Amino acid sequence: MKHKKNILAASVFTAVLILAVVIGYKNLSYNWQWYRVAPYFFSFENGRFVAGVLLQGVWITFKISAISLVLALVTGMVSAFARLSPYVSLRVLAWCYVETIRNTPLLIQIFVIYFVISPVLDLSAFTSAVIALSLFEGAYSSEIIRSGIINIPKGQFEAAQSIGLPVFATYYKVVVPQMLRQTLPMLAGQSVSLIKDSALVSTISIYDLTMQGQKIVSETFLTFEIWFAVALCYLSITATLSFIIRRIETRMRFVN
């Protein structure tokens, strides 16, 4: 019964939303030119597929997000274990990293890494963007992972020790699977945030999806068409990622 009510509420909300969009679309005094958008995604020249600038921007956004996501999870895992370490120096170091990153804007961090650190280390704009996003999302992932480990009952550690599991095997076979089951929805939300935050790398002249959209709008004045197309691209990427993580979450629950 409750499930049917939820479906009915979702259907009503969707219908109202579509109606509002249709009315707004018709009443807006704007010369829509959707037919001009497609070539910015792809075209065919002499029967050969040619990627448009928006599709190239999608690829750059995908690369930055994918690499940053992997590095953010690694950084979050390492800093989470460092904060739970018995060594004071590691705990202080990890605390300073997490609090510094979480309490400063991502845009400032991108500028600091690109304009201050990258000239010294000779880093490209792409590498600077990946480092900034990885450190930023890694700090939030660290707290999520740490909370998942803390919530595991002490009896699980004691049971692992009682059967003679070494420390690494205890974490690999007992702690990490349970932590992932508890924190996967929150890590999924953080991953979606990373993709949306990647739009800020356009400020350091990386031709990602947002930067390509800005460039096209300034040249053609197709403001609404291009930004709607860019938003649809981001929605497609984040929805696909959410679906994949949902499948992983369902599988983990089935296995256990």
Image (cartoon, rainbow, N blue to C red):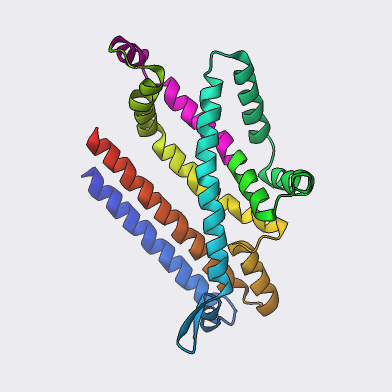
Left or right: where does residue 129 sit relative to residue 40? Answer: right
Image location of residue 207, percent across then percent down: 64, 64
Magenta-drawn stretch contains 75 = no
Depth check, front residue: 50 or 200: 50
Look at the picture and state if 79 lies above or below 254: above
Left or right: where does residue 132 sit relative to residue 37? Answer: right
| Residue located 43% across and 62% down the image | 17
Where is residue 18, by image quadrant? bottom left
| Residue located 70% across and 73% down the image | 218
Left or right: where does residue 28 sit relative to residue 3? Answer: right
Look at the picture and state if 212 lies above or below 125: below
Where is residue 54, by image quadrant? bottom right
Image location of residue 11, percent across then percent down: 32, 58
| Residue located 38% across and 57% down the image | 13
Depth check, front residue: 200 or 158: 158
| Residue located 64% across and 19% down the image | 92
Q: Which residues are magenta?
A: 136-162
Image location of residue 87, percent across then percent down: 58, 14
Q: Is residue 228 visible?
A: no
Magenta-drawn stretch contains 138 = yes
Depth check, front residue: 54 or 20: 54
Quadrant for the C terminus, please: top left
Quadrant for the N terminus, please: top left
Predominant SS along the magenta part: helix
Look at the picture and state if 47 lies above or below 28: below
Image location of residue 251, percent across then percent down: 27, 42
Look at the picture and state if 85 lies above or below 42: above
